[in-house]
Amino acid sequence: MKEQSVCLWVYLLFREVYRHKNSMVNAIKGVFISCDIPMGQLIVNMNNSMPSSQRFIIHVLDSTHLFVLPHVEQMIRSAIAEFRNQNSYEKPT
C-alpha cells in the first residue's frame, strides 16, 4: 500500500511537471505521514480548523497518507498523544 501511494505521488508530481514544462518546477519540502483512518481524519480536521494562512497539509494522497509541511510535525505528534490520552480506557478502582 505504501509503495502504491508513493508511486501515485510521483505520478502526480511528474504529471504536473509535464503539464507546466515551460515553467520552473517548485519543490516543497514536507513530511510524509502514514497513519490509520481515524488519525488521518484527526490531522485533516486540525488543518481545516486553522485559518487558511496557517494550513499545513500540502497534499492528501488517500485516507491514510498525507504530505504536510515539516514545521508542524511536533504539533501533530502532540495532538495525537493528547487524543490518545483522552480516549484511553482506565479501569475503575
Image: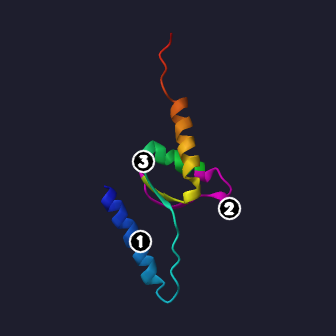
Residue ID at (43%, 73%): 13
Residue ID at (56%, 36%): 82
Q: Residue furthest top?
A: 93
Q: Amino acid at mark 2?
A: Ser
Residue ID at (50%, 47%): 41
**Residue 49 lies in magenta, yes or no?**
yes
Residue 3: image location, x then y, percent: 31, 60
Is 77 above or below relative to 86? below
Q: Which type of secondary structure does the marked residue at label 3 adopt?
A: loop
Q: Residues within 10 Å of mark 1 (few under 14, many from 20)?
A: few
Q: Amino acid at mark 3?
A: Cys
The nearer-to-camera label among 3 and 1 is 3
Stretch of the chain drawn in magenta: 47-64
Residue for badge 2: 53
Of callouts 2 and 1, the N-terminal one = 1
Is 78 above or below relative to 14? above
User: How many discs appear?
Assistant: 3
Q: Residues within 10 Å of mark 3 (few under 14, many from 20)?
A: some
- Label 2 – label 3 distance at C-alpha: 25 Å
Is 82 above or below relative to 71? above
Residue for badge 1: 12
Q: Residues within 10 Å of mark 2 (few under 14, many from 20)?
A: few
Q: Which type of secondary structure does the marked residue at label 1 adopt?
A: helix
**Residue 51 lies in magenta, yes or no?**
yes
For the N terminus, the quadrant is: bottom left
Residue for badge 3: 35
